[in-house]
Amino acid sequence: QVPPVESGGGWVQPGGSLKLSCEASRSVFSIYTVAWYRQTPGKQRELVASITRFYDTNYTDSVKGRFTISRDNSEKTGYLVMNNLKPEDTAVYYCNLLSAGIPWGQGTQVTVSS
């Protein structure tokens, strides 16, 4: 199984924005829920947002109103638009397809600081 490839991370000042992308090679991408997670050193990986095959979305409380998850089934790609970023959003961000049995990718680092 090929892990997803995350991209789009970087350094941004508080209040800034970033758009993360997640490219998956799973042949049947459209049937799976796409999920974004984040992890900081010493902490467990946290589910940030998810979008089902029916485009139903869910967000953890701390990002509601600031982050938007989306997907493009034709491109087998998931996205996470992050606005009004805060220092506590600093983490390595990972994506995956729920229940697809795909290993974790390398993630993409997001650093929010002044």
Image: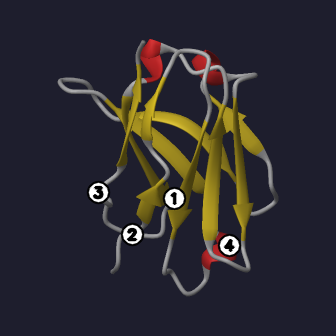
User: Going from the N terminus, do you reach mark 2 or mark 4 first?
Assistant: 4
Q: CA distance from mark 4 to mark 3?
A: 23 Å
Front position in the image: 52 or 82: 82
Q: Is 41 placed above or below 81 here?
A: above
x and y, in percent, of residue 12 in the image = 48, 27
* Amino acid found under the numbered disc labelled 3: Gln
Give me the residue at 32% from left, 61% from top: 105
Q: Splitting the image into 4 quarters, where does residue 91 fall?
A: top left
The residue wearing badge 2 is 101
* Amino acid found under the numbered disc labelled 4: Ile
x and y, in percent, of residue 5 in the image = 41, 65
Give me the residue at 34% from left, 35% from top: 45
Front position in the image: 101 or 1: 1
Q: Splitting the image into 4 quarters, where does residue 6 fall?
A: bottom left
Q: CA distance from mark 2 to mark 3?
A: 16 Å
The residue wearing badge 4 is 31
User: Going from the N terminus, do you reach mark 2 or mark 3 first?
Assistant: 2
Front position in the image: 10 or 27: 10
Q: CA distance from mark 1 to mark 3?
A: 17 Å
The residue wearing badge 3 is 106
**Which disc number belongs to residue 98?**
1
User: Going from the N terminus, do you reach mark 1 or mark 3 first?
Assistant: 1
Give me the residue at 53% from left, 15% from top: 14
Q: Considering the image in quadrants, where does the C terminus appear?
A: top left
Q: Is residue 97 left or right of residue 49?
A: left
Q: Considering the image in quadrants, where does the N terminus appear?
A: bottom left
User: Going from the N terminus, do you reach mark 1 or mark 4 first?
Assistant: 4
* Amino acid found under the numbered disc labelled 2: Gly
Crowd around label 2: few <14 · some 14–19 · many ≥20 (10 Å): few
Q: Is 61 placed above or below 107 here?
A: above
Marks 2,4: beta carbons within 8 A? no
